[in-house]
Amino acid sequence: MTLPVFQLRRNPFGRLVYQGADGVTHEGVIPVRAFPISEADRGLSLVTSDGRELLWIERLADVPAAERALMEEELAGREFMPEIRKLVSVSTYATPSTWKVDTDRGPTTFTLRGEEDIRRLTQHTLLIADSHGIFYLVRDVLSLDKHSRKLLDRFL
C-alpha cells in the first residue's frame, strides 16, 4: 500500500504541521506508535491534538526521508524511555527504595515508590516507573547479569 501524498514541517513554535493531499493543514499533530516497544518501526499514526487520526503509516521506512526525520525527532522527545542494562544497587528491599542503574543513556539513580510500579509486559520484559513518572525498560530480564537479576527478583 502506498502512502497518500502529505507534507510535514515545523511551524515557528516548533510544532508539527501536517498538510494532506486535500491541502488542509493541521497544526500540532502528534506521531503515535501503535506498538512502541515490540514493533517500533511498524504501525504509526499522525493524530491531531484532540486525538483524531489524520494518517496511518504501516511502516515508518515508507515515509519520505524529510518527513520521517521530523517524526523520529518528535517521537524521541515524547518516548524518552531509558533501557536498564544493569542494576548497580538498591538502597533497601522495602519501598520506597533508591535504585542505582546503568542504562543505554548512562548511569542514573531513581526512586521506586512501590512494587506496583514494576509492570511485566511480556514474560521477560519489564517497565519500571520511577517517582517522577519516567519509565525505564528492561527489555530482557534474562540478559541482565546475575547480580542485577538477584536484586530485581526481590521486587518481583
Image (cartoon, rainbow, N blue to C red):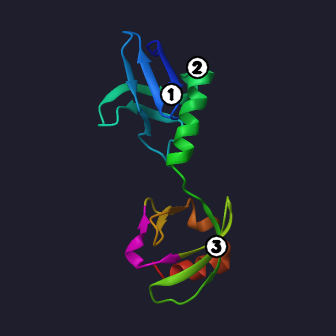
Secondary structure at numbered mark 1: loop
Please report whichever mark, 1 or 3, sits nearer to the chain's N-terminal start: 1
Q: Residue at x 54, y 78 (%)?
A: 152
Secondary structure at numbered mark 2: loop
Q: CA distance from mark 1 to mark 3?
A: 38 Å
Residue 73's spot in the image, x, y percent?
Answer: 58, 38
Residue 154's spot in the image, x, y percent?
Answer: 50, 84
Task: Classify residue 97 as left or right of residue 145.
Answer: left
Q: CA distance from mark 2 to mark 3?
A: 38 Å
* Residue 64 numbered mark, or none: 2
Task: Classify residue 85 as left or right of residue 116.
Answer: right
Q: CA distance from mark 2 to mark 1?
A: 19 Å
Seen from the viewer's position, the closer of residues 21 and 42 is 21
Which segment did they paint magenta? Answer: 111-120
Furthest residue in direction top, as rendered: 22
Secondary structure at numbered mark 3: strand
Q: Which residue is mark 3?
A: 101
Residues at circles 2 and 3 in contact by the CB criterion of under 8 Å: no
What amino acid is at disc 3? Answer: Val
Vertical side of 58 occupied by 32: above or below: below
What amino acid is at disc 1? Answer: Asn
In this rendering, the count of numbered labels is 3
Q: Does residue 119 appear anywhere in the picture?
A: yes
* Residue 11 numbered mark, or none: 1
Q: Quadrant of the N terminus?
A: top left
Within the image, what quadrant is residue 147 found in? bottom right
